[in-house]
Amino acid sequence: MSGLAMPKPDDATMRRRDEIVADMRIIVPGEGVVDAANSMRAFESDGLTAYRQLPLVVVLPETVAQVSRVLKYCNDRNIRVVPRGSGTSLSGGALPLEDAVLLVMSRFNRILEIDFPNRIVVAQPGVTNLGITTAVEQEGFYYAPDPSSQIACSIGGNVAENSGGVHCLKYGLTANNVLGIEMVLMSGEVVRLGGSHLDCEGYDLLGVMTGSEGLLGVVTEVTVRILKKPETARALLIGFPTSEQGGQCVADIIGAGIIPGGMEMMDRPAIHAAEDFVHAGYPLDVEALLIVELDGPGVEVDHLIGLVEAIAYRNGSTTCRISQSEQERLSFWAGRKAAFPAVGRISPDYYCMDGTIPRKELPRVLAGMRELSEKYGLGVANVFHAGDGNLHPLILYDANVPGELDKAESFGADILRLCVKVGGVLTGEHGVGVEKRDLMPEMFNQIDLDQQMRVKCAFDPNHLLNPGKVFPQLRRCAELGRMHVHRGQVAFPDIPRF
């Protein structure tokens, strides 16, 4: 697995593998346990395919009771567990461990309830993101968060990563659209957070779980908010001679008080790759392409289109197309939605990054990425959620060339450092996983990391659930409880200690 440091396999667990597999077959009978090496290859990585590792065993439960028994069994015997949804994570969050049970939730694939009057859907975690919209669209509803992988990614994985998508600018991330979950703790205890109501009292544990990357519990049910489709939705396709002008246009649109349904930006390499792939009619003589979607009542949309068009021309746009039909609007988005696979056609491999910056820093960061591209001798194609500053640089490399993966990783790390330097953060929606794990100290000091670890310890005191992810240093929870004694005195002796 490249040079990535992961937790050392537990020898006692490895010696008991046959016993563990046999016990898993009792808990999950039938075809729910996969232990042959060739069959486990399908689970050896997630969307971050640069890192691969066969698990100890793959377990695919079908009921909450089975999930509970698997987790309790592993907790009682000090066996690590890695939860996995559809495996579309791009940060290595579902990367297996050699001594861990890989708990795959893909068989939890049913929608349990659709409540149109209250505008909610209750789904199992293996239901795909797009599957929720498909289930309610006949009544004019949809589920707003729409990551590019929505045809494949699961709603449980969306909760784990707090996924977004092109419409998250106006309608929010997963955290803004999930009302409740059922989850199983590492101890096997089944708990519910939130429900079908808007907010629940007490601590925001639902907020803690959303984006927790499988470190705190295993989600077995999700209640989401669905929205009525807007009366009208139209999109503008705007080209600019420079990325800086496109970035300034983004800032000016938001500054004018306009919140588009979606606002995405692509640079020249991504534009050409997408156009060659889907033939969406993108202009090829521009350096930056902005897609701005406006939705709502028809009169309001027409008014806002005029305002956005004027802002675009003030920023030097050389082309501006306005969708005249639903088919044309969808064609504008087709290239953006297919940008990742499209870039895969122009490079043997690419490394997809995920950082977020203040919108006003977009020109500076784009210029910085061009300098880094020259420094490392690797190309980069930019596709990003311009409205909320969530960047997705695609670093182009060839894994068959010795050293190029290492260069791509270093290039990506420098991009993320640049994001933090300008006031941004390490991730917008892909999560930390293993990809950004060792960069966490760039953004957080040790006090911050210790406080995050305390939350982990409250849910999983033995650190058995998805270890080696997010935290740059693998520690036991007991280490946080050690008090520093200097000359017979602890710090702040007047504070009561329990």
Image (cartoon, grey):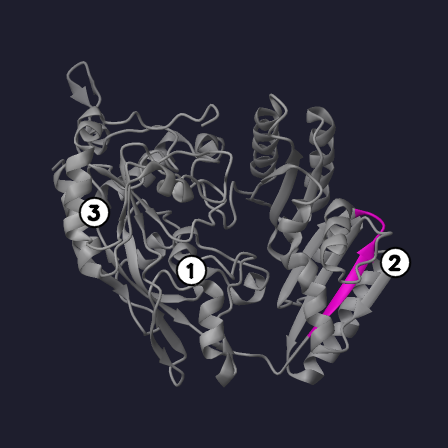
| Quarter of the image where one finds residue 58 | top left
Which percent across, then down, holds residue 139?
49, 85
- Residue at the spot of label 3: 186
Which percent across, then down, holds residue 35?
28, 41
Which percent across, then down, holds residue 434?
43, 35
| Quarter of the image where one finds residue 418 | top right
Chief SS of the magenta region = strand
Question: Does the magenta segment cover residue 235?
Answer: yes
Report the Cα–Cα distance between label 3 and label 1.
Answer: 23 Å
Report the Cα–Cα distance between label 2 and label 1.
Answer: 38 Å
Of mark 2 and mark 1, the one earlier in the sequence is 1
Q: Quadrant of the N terminus?
A: top left
Q: Disc number at residue 318?
A: 2
| Residue 94 visible at all | no
Q: Is residue 470 above or below residue 391?
A: above
Q: Amino acid at mark 2?
A: Thr
Query: What segment is highlighted magenta in the picture?
Result: 234-242
Task: Answer with left or right where residue 15 lies relative to residue 354.
Answer: left
Q: Disc number at residue 175?
A: 1
